[in-house]
Image (cartoon, grey):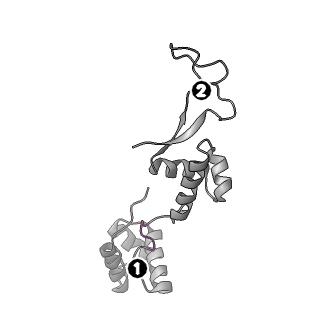
Amino acid sequence: MKRPISLDLRQRILASYDQNEGTREEIAQRFRVSLGMVKKLLQQRRHTGNIACRYDHCGRRPRIVAVHRQKLRELLGRKPDLTLEELRRATQLDCTIQAIHYVLEEMGLTYKKRRSGLVNKSDRILPGHAGSGAGSNRRWTRHG
């Protein structure tokens, strides 16, 4: 993941540009940032007057926000064996399945296969109950 550049560096880049200390390409090389970053800073300043990072996390705006996390928690509280695809449909999220998986991991939830009925004390699983069936023997559980 790309790291955001500090406000101080943003100010120095723009001050250098404003004082005609080189072309955009030369300034990008001097401060070891991409030409695109210099262009974006200039454009951001021109459009908003602000050069600070536009988002708290300085990167892509998250698609799964607190409201979605709460909804995921509620859904899994009612039915812990929902699949990632079922969760995506239920929350109407426009994101990848992996994104939902990562958020659930961050929330301390993991998708565990659970054991169905035991045949005897030797801890063997009943035939057909531990397979990969329709997911009825899997559920999201809280860890950590």
Q: Horizontally, is 56 left or right of 127 in the view?
A: left
Q: Point out the stretch of residues depicted in magenta.
A: 54-58
Q: What residue type is disc 1 on?
A: Ile
The residue pinned by badge 1 equals 51
Q: Is residue 119 above or below residue 9?
A: above
- Rendering coords of residue 21 (x, y %): 33, 81
Judging from the image, what secondary structure is the residue with disc 2 in? loop
Q: What residue type is disc 2 on?
A: Ser
Q: Identify the residue at image location x=35%, y=75%.
A: 10
Judging from the image, what secondary structure is the residue with disc 1 in? loop
Q: Horizontally, is 60 left or right of 133 in the view?
A: left
Let me know if residue 21 appears in the view.
no
Q: Identify the residue at image location x=57%, y=55%.
A: 74
Q: Identify the residue at image location x=33%, y=79%.
A: 11
Q: Is residue 37 magenta?
A: no
Q: Is residue 38 above or below residue 82?
A: below
- Mark pair 1, 2: CA separation: 57 Å
Q: Is residue 61 above or below residue 110?
A: below
Which of label 1 and label 2 is nearer to you?
Answer: 2
- Rendering coords of residue 85 (x, y %): 66, 47
**Which of pointers 1 and 2 lies earlier in the amino acid sequence?**
1
The residue pinned by badge 2 equals 116
Answer few, some or many: residues within 10 Å of disc 1's Cα (few below 14, many 20 plus, some between 14 and 19).
some
Answer few, some or many: residues within 10 Å of disc 2's Cα (few below 14, many 20 plus, some between 14 and 19).
some
